Amino acid sequence: MTSHLEILAILTSAVLIVWLFRRLKLPAILAYLVAGMLVGEHGLALAHDQVDYDHFAELGIVFLLFTLGLEFSVPKLMAMRHLVLWVGSLQVAISLLVFMLIAMLFGQSLSSSFVIGGILALSSTAIVIRQLSETGTMKRKSGQLSVAVLLFQDVAVVPLLIIIPMLAMDSESSMILALLLALIKGVFVVSVLLLAGKWILPRLFNLIAQVRTDELFVLTTLLVTLVASALTQWFGLSMALGAFLAGMMLGESQYKHQLEADIRPYRDILLGLFFVTVGMKLNISILLSSPIVIISIMILFMLTKILVITFLAIRAGELPKDAWASGIMLAQMGEFGFVLIALAGQVKLLSPGVASILLGAGVISMAITPYMINNARNWSLWLSRERLNRETQTRQKELQELPENNGLKDHVIICGFGRVGQTVSRFLKQESIDFVAIDIDPLRTSKAREAGENVLFGSSRQTELLQAAHLAEAKLVVIAFGEDKQSIEVIKKVRSLSADVPILVRTRNDDQLNLLKEAGANEVVPEILEGSLMLVSQVLSLTGVPFSKIMRRVQKERKNHYNHLHGFFQGEHTDMSPDAMDRIEFAHAIMLNDDSYGRGKTIEALNLESRRVKIIALRRDGKEIEEPDESTVLKAQDTLIVRGKPMEVERTERFILEGP
């Protein structure tokens, strides 16, 4: 009974704290650590049998390494080999050595210092990649540089997981012997698993896929992961190594994305439990008694990593601003650092006090990472301003001035000169309409200007560039880069300079359509919905519908903000995540019976608009009435087809059937 109460306490604290942290836009990893601190022996002491939880938590690391293996791509590694092998490898090696020497100066043993160096040398793949995706920085050079360094760090985790248990050996000779034996075993196990991956696993998953049973596919994925990890454990190596190899074998297969989707729920839950168990080891009294030590260690290792990464990136030929930005993004401790702390604690290489201080410094560094990544570009520009040579400054200034046509009037400003922006410009030229484009890519800007195009280099969010593009005299602003967050910032900047100029925005889908409109966009063109309209036009045309009628229908949809293209019936694979639930709309059928509250009432009397639900159609006597009149009286056996957000649709159905 006690164990059930402990599990209940862990789950309750995890749910509440994860909810709170996500509301505050903080990483879920931190929430799990805090939940562990709360229920652990150093907190409220609600959970005691930590050894039992550790066994389950270890599976979280196994599944994490499996998904890492799925993402590990040898072709991708080879494509980025210059940055990965030069900047990535040297960053890990130099950072590890520096932190190791500092730890030895503070009285740590050689083995413990090596472990501390390895822990602090790694950065958070999960947080950095997520933030880069959300801010649209992944496509910038600083983002690509960060990904290259993270790629090598993820690879470096595997040998660290093997070496750390070996460091707990009593004598140096036995450790060297164990390392040699581990190398031989490793080569043998890797060979066995790679052969199995090439000859057995593809045939196995082909057989499983033919059965078309989701449960069997999930079970097979779990079995393969656990068998591979058990094999490496049986040979005295890390379970995580086997899982990584299993993932790497399946990473090039056609089932990669399905495997990742299947394993994710188990990985996330068990990984959450792992971070809870790490948090349970945190001694709050040590954290409260030595906050200055923890903050000092955090500042020291973050500054060291920033300087090391920046120096190596500049030496590799990157621009100073990109090098500084990448260093700032990768300054924090990573989730694998917590894995190594837990492993080092198990083999008695780190004392509980040192582990708690490292955990505390790591938690704080991860908490401030989103803020650092959001400001990395501005800080890097400020830090590198003194370092830009005169030639570079002159070149950038030239790219921020129009080569000709300074007397522009009634022209179009195109923000983003990628494929879409260039396509727009070609059609404008055919109609003899002047345009000015603004693009952040210096190479693309140079190439376009050499071809005689009016293109400015820089961010569309800069007042000076918009003024240089003669915004006051422009007829239209087209935002063509398709990143909603950046588009909203550009819209606000344009509106602050010109309240009347029409703004047309390209977006990938309709998730942020209302936000873009509220920011000041006159028209928003969602690619997915426009693609659907073009497909419908072709379908209607090929089935004999007159072209004039097709155009009227298409124009009506655009005028009504694609109303008929919203609200689809959900399927098994519909994204039902909390983020998606805030933006998606479902179509839902509500059938009335003799006892329904809505029977005998008009559509107007029900006032469903106030419930944020729209009626798409009414099905009566086998016929469908599209957008029925508000005076229509509902009858028994009528089926109302409505659309709206899931919660609103559910409440509306209850209201129509049962009443208020």
Image (cartoon, grey):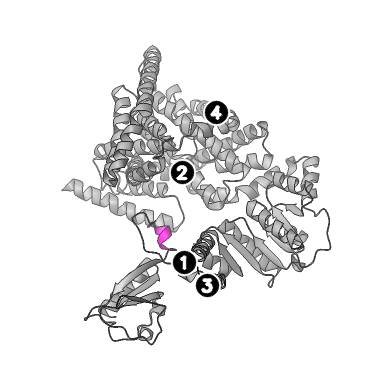
Q: Residues within 10 Å of mark 3 (few under 14, many from 20)?
A: some
Residue tagged 2: 126
Q: Is residue 355 something that shows in the picture?
A: yes
**Mark 2 or mark 4, earlier in chain:** 4
Q: Residue at x 39, y 40 (%)?
A: 255
* Nearer the camera: disc 2 or disc 3: 3
Dominant SS type (magenta) = loop
Q: Is residue 520 something that shows in the picture?
A: no
Query: In the picture shown, does residue 463 fall above or below 439?
Result: below
577 is within the stretch colored magenta: yes
Label 2–label 3 contact, CB within 8 A: no
Q: Secondary structure at mark 3?
A: helix
Label 2–label 4 contact, CB within 8 A: no
* Residue placed furthest toward the front: 544
Looking at numbered disc 2 in the image, what kind of residue is underneath it? Ala
Label 4–label 3 contact, CB within 8 A: no
Residue tagged 1: 565
189 is within the stretch colored magenta: no
**Mark 1 or mark 4, earlier in chain:** 4
| Residues drawn in magenta | 566-582
Residue tagged 3: 553
* Nearer the camera: disc 4 or disc 3: 3
* Nearer the camera: disc 3 or disc 1: 3
* Nearer the camera: disc 1 or disc 2: 1
**Mark 4 or mark 3, earlier in chain:** 4
Q: Residues within 10 Å of mark 2 (few under 14, many from 20)?
A: some
Residue 235 at what x, y percent from top left?
31, 21
Report, in whole angstroms, how far the alpha carbon at label 1 lies from the one at label 4.
49 Å
Q: Would residue 192 appear left or right of 547 to someone viewing this image? A: left
Residue tagged 4: 89
Report, in whole angstroms, how far the alpha carbon at label 2 lies from the one at label 4.
20 Å
